[in-house]
Image: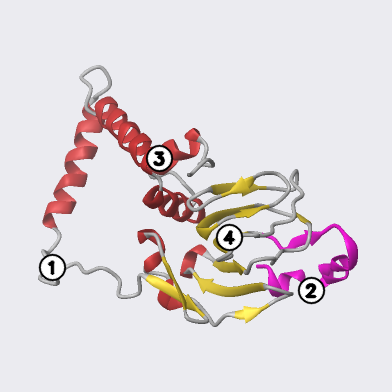
Amino acid sequence: MINFHPKFVDLQGFSAGNCEPAMALMISAHVDMCPQCQHDCMEIQAELAKALFSPKTTSAPLDTQYLEMVTKITDLPVSDTPVTEPSNTSIELDGKFFELPRALRRHAKNTGNWSRLVGKLWQAPVDLGDIGKANFMYMEKGGRVPEHTHKGSEMTLVIDGQYGDGIAEYDCGDFTLLNNQHKHLPHSEADDGCLVFTIVDQPLHFTAGIARLLNPFSHLFFK
């Protein structure tokens, strides 16, 4: 069951097309997995459309701007190339296949090789082009990321399985946004482990034990 969602204000920004690209990608992938947020986005978009075309809010400049936009769209050449789904709808690790939400499928071909980081933790980098870089992270049963906080922000979406971090327990489809006000220790005890998709804009900062020795090098592994 999905219990953690983007904030409603972020869903509003996403529905209006005003999100930063990284946030838009994460919300889009979450919405692919979450019926509740699909419904919320449809309602937000309906309200935006109602406000846009309301006689009380429509003005002559808006009419002109809208007509110009429609004209540009209709003047575009029609492509004969059929729209097809990306061929890679899943990613694989050691014979395990993980189905991806629709928004992430086009990035599957830009996913690098899996590498073992520490213990039962695996990482595969994802080149998002102009958006930046992301990672698929897989925790085997008993796997964990050392306790850390964040110099910037960390967005995480659970693709498969479950994990906890000392703050809460997360299931498939859950979305989290953490910053330097949060300290956590992600770990999975699920029999099939846990796969997440994560974007961080600054390296992690480890806060406990011998892992603190990794701080000068954390940008090499966790970004």
Q: Which residue is mark 4?
A: 199
Quick one: SS at disc 1? loop
Report the Cα–Cα distance between label 2 and label 3.
37 Å
Dot 2 amino acid type: Phe
> Is 63 placed above or below 24 here?
above
Quick one: SS at disc 4? strand
Farthest-out residue, top: 56
Tag 4: Cα neighbours inside 10 Å, few (<14), some, or many (≥20)?
Answer: many
Report the Cα–Cα distance between label 4 and label 2.
18 Å
Q: Which mark is residue 79?
A: 1
Q: Which residue is mark 3?
A: 37
Instruction: State the extent of the magenta-drawn residues as a range.
Output: 202-223
Q: Which residue is mark 2?
A: 217
Farthest-out residue, front: 191
Dot 1 amino acid type: Ser
Q: Mark 1 or mark 4: which comes first in sequence?
A: 1
Which residue appears at 77% of the width and 49% of the height?
183
Report the Cα–Cα distance between label 1 and label 4.
34 Å
Tag 2: Cα neighbours inside 10 Å, few (<14), some, or many (≥20)?
Answer: few
Circle nearer the viewer, 1 or 2: 2
Circle nearer the viewer, 3 or 4: 3
Which residue appears at 35% of the width and 42% of the height?
38
Name the spot of residue 57 as percent of width and height, x first. Answer: 28, 21
Dot 4 amino acid type: Ile
Dot 3 amino acid type: Cys
Q: Mark 2 or mark 3: which comes first in sequence?
A: 3
